[in-house]
Image (tube, rainbow, N blue to C red):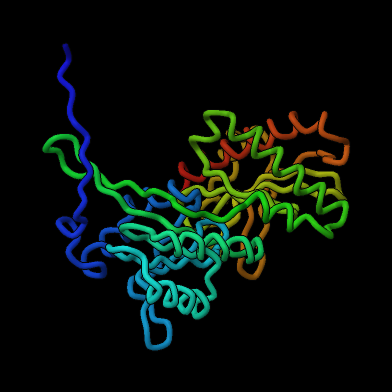
Amino acid sequence: MPALGRIERVDDLRTIWQHETHDFSKWLAQEENLVLLSEAIGIDIVFEELESPVGGFNVDLYGTEDGTGRKIIIENQLEDTNHDHLGKIITYASGKGAEVIVWIVKRARDEHKQAVEWINQHTDENIGFFLIEIELWRINDSLPAPKFNVIERPNDWSKIVKASEGLSDTKKLQLDFWQAFCDYAFARPEFSRAFSKRKASPQHWYDLSVGNSAYHIALTANTQKKRLGVEIYIDDDKERFEKFRANKDAIEEELGSSIEWRTANKACRILVLRDGDIKKGESAWPKQFDWLCDMALKLRNIAKKYDN
């Protein structure tokens, strides 16, 4: 018979992290650990600052969402939830203008689960509150392994329904198109391995992270010009843009397509376009989805290859 280990939970978190600020927050700020948290909540977090000031107080960790720039605050509590921390979190969120709030605790009490659920139900689609329990597990005498257990999260479905009320026909079409795209694209293993899924919105674009806060891949569907696009969107970094453009011929050969190189005051775009009318109906969407997926994967590979 094969020998098997026994999984055990480490109940005393402070045997690993004695102090929330000096130990746990510094551990969480490391890239490989933020990746674990990002995977748990489905949002790509870019670290900005530890002990970020808010008036006379400090929030444990301040970050942004890769690709969108949404502001994220993370408050850590290696004990049971309490009213004091909940009040602080709301103060921090207000002071930072945060759109994503993450409260990491040892154990979430029922009254605070209900409070976070209530906040998510009564805020618009721009605000999301996550309540997470941090757990440690080991097999026999192995090193303890962390696990983020999401207790409460934004109810995206109800917010999408709420957001769709009163939308124009074009905005409803955009929302339906990107929702269908997400279902289709992330069923492809190579696409789901390359990109993180994000909530669809009633707009003409859908952003994808490439793991670099300096730029991201944007998919576009222009209903007026009946055109689809995929681009590398570079925010305020002309030097990086010119580094890509120095390889223009090689990049176009790899893509098998011509590229538009667009510059503005801050943002620069490396853009591939093709005809595509999403108003033709859902029967035409799969071929459009395939092109968007394939081109996004190619541009992702190009970004990683030539940005060095």
- Please say whether residue 239 is visible from this viewpoint: no
Question: Quick check: 33 left or right of 254?
Answer: left
Question: Quick check: 244 left or right of 32?
Answer: right
Residue at horizontal 55 percent and vertical 67 percent from the top: 99
- Please say whether residue 149 is visible from this viewpoint: yes
Instruction: Please identify the quarter of the rendering in which residue 181 is found.
Output: top right
Residue furthest out toward the front:
111
Instruction: Please identify the quarter of the rendering in which residue 182 is found.
Output: top right
Between residue 93 and residue 118, name the one nearer to us: 118
Image quadrant for the N terminus? top left
Instruction: Please identify the quarter of the rendering in which residue 289 is found.
Output: top right
Residue at horizontal 28 percent and vertical 47 percent from the top: 146
Between residue 296 and residue 160, name the one nearer to us: 160
Residue at horizontal 62 percent and vertical 49 percent from the top: 199
Residue at horizontal 67 percent and vertical 46 percent from the top: 219
Between residue 132 and residue 219, name the one nearer to us: 132
In percent of width and height, residue 291 lies at 69, 33
In percent of width and height, residue 135 lies at 29, 49
Residue furthest out toward the top:
1
Give the tally of numbered discs.
0
In percent of width and height, residue 128 lies at 55, 61
Residue furthest out toward the bottom:
56
